[in-house]
Amino acid sequence: MARRRSKKKVAVAYVPPVDATPERLAKGDDSEWVNAAEIDDTEQAINRVRRFRSSTLDRLHNNGKISWPQWYAGDQYRNAYHRAAMLPGVVASYGERTTVGECSYGLARTESQVRARQFVRQCREQIPFDMRGFMDRLLIHDDLPRYGGRKAMRSLAEVRRTLDSLADFMRIAS
């Protein structure tokens, strides 16, 4: 077996990222400014790249594992859930109340929130009871466990069936 020759690693001095924050702009000192576009990557590695992460539902659709009506039904459910503002905005308050009038105790503040909450409840009735938590993890929290083999295919088939039932309820043409 041949010996592998590895390249020697060159030690590169770390340069912290510089953002144009109001505090830095107030200082007015441009001598420390490093333009990332002018860095020669042979001399210094650019180690921080901004990456945008797509949701699991979007990746399933882009890979062709779910159809457009299934994706659209899941997207509508996710958007309605966020419009409904189901979770309370304040978890704990350690001071005087700043709200005017009576406290709402999680009641909807606007008519659009009431309609969105009704829509979410109707959609949840279409999801089988044993799949509700799994679909909430997938659609709302974007948390899908990584399975392998037959279990992954079974969960994907269940997701497809559930999204089909949501699409039928929403009357999305397939």
Image: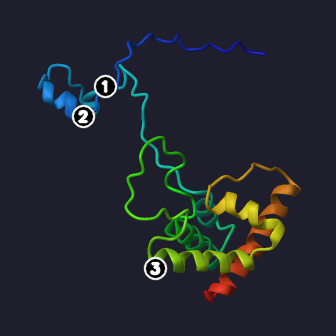
Q: Which of 78 and 64 lies nearest the eye of the viewer?
A: 78
Dot 1: element? loop
Dot 2: element? loop
Q: Is residue 7 visible?
A: yes
Between marks 2 and 1 in the image, the one whose residue lies nearer the viewer? 2
Task: Classify residue 62 by image quadrant.
Answer: bottom right
Disc 2: which residue: 21
Q: Which of 47 and 43 lies nearest the eye of the viewer?
A: 47
Mark earlier in primary sequence (2, 3): 2
User: How far across and down, in percent of the image, does residue 112 sit?
Assistant: 46, 78
At 55% from the left and 62% from the top, the residue drawn is 105
User: How far across and down, in percent of the image, does residue 94 sit?
Assistant: 48, 41
Q: Is residue 72 visible?
A: no
Disc 3: which residue: 111
Are the residues at dot 2 and dot 1 in contact (C-beta closer than 8 Å)? no
Quadrant of the rendering where the C terminus is positioned = bottom right
52 horizontally vs 117: left or right: left
Dot 3: element? helix
Marks 2 and 1 sit apart, C-alpha to C-alpha, by 25 Å
118 horizontally vs 39: left or right: right
**Total labels drawn:** 3
When the figure is inspected, residue 145 is found, relative to residue 118, above or below; the finding is above
Q: Mark 3: which amino acid?
A: Glu
Marks 2 and 3 sit apart, C-alpha to C-alpha, by 39 Å
Disc 1: which residue: 40
Q: Mark 1: which amino acid?
A: Asp
Between marks 1 and 3 in the image, the one whose residue lies nearer the viewer? 3
At 66% from the left and 76% from the top, the residue drawn is 121
